[in-house]
Amino acid sequence: MAALMRTHDWAQSPLGCPGAWPPALRSVVTLILGDMTIPGGISGLENAGDFRRRRPAVPIVLTTGLASWAIDARAADIRLLLKPYGSDELGATLRAELKRAHA
């Protein structure tokens, strides 16, 4: 996804080039929720790292069913939510990450 976003010809879109976007549009993302497994050969961790380089203040939460990803996620300072999880745990995790980002 990150590669598609980088290579997309935004100049041909109604939004225009990202550098010319108003601050409100550039800052609309307040949290990233993704999965560690992404089709197409890139991991969620790689995708999150790519995003983090561009927007370091935006919290990232990744989900997975594999506890073995925990070490890599922790090293990258990314919150990992293990599956299966319920809506209460998801909500608490997202609130905690938003709070931590704005502390």
Image (cartoon, rainbow, N blue to C red):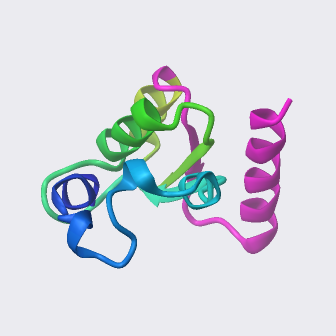
- Residue 66 point in image, percent of width and height: 41, 49
Question: Measured along the vertical axis of the image, is residue 15 above or below residue 18?
Answer: below
> Is residue 97 found left or right of 63 in the rendered image?
right
Magenta stretch holds residue 68: no
Q: Quadrant of the N terminus?
A: bottom left
Q: Nearer the viewer, residue 16 or 33?
A: 16
- Residue 4 point in image, percent of width and height: 20, 61
Q: Which residues are magenta?
A: 75-103
Q: For the point 36% across and 78% down, which residue is it?
A: 14
In terms of image quadrants, where is residue 25? bottom right
Question: Measured along the vertical axis of the image, is residue 36 above or below residue 49?
Answer: below
Q: For the point 28% across and 76% down, which residue is it?
A: 13
Question: Measured along the vertical axis of the image, is residue 43 above or below residue 37?
Answer: above
Q: Quadrant of the C terminus?
A: top right
- Residue 20 point in image, percent of width and height: 43, 53
> Is residue 95 found left or right of 73 in the rendered image?
right
Q: For the point 27% across and 48% down, which residue is it?
A: 43
In terms of image quadrants, where is residue 69? top left
Q: Residue furthest top?
A: 75
Q: Nearer the viewer, residue 3 or 48?
A: 3
Q: Residue furthest front?
A: 20
Q: For the point 56% across and 56% down, which residue is it?
A: 22
Visible residue check, residue 95:
yes
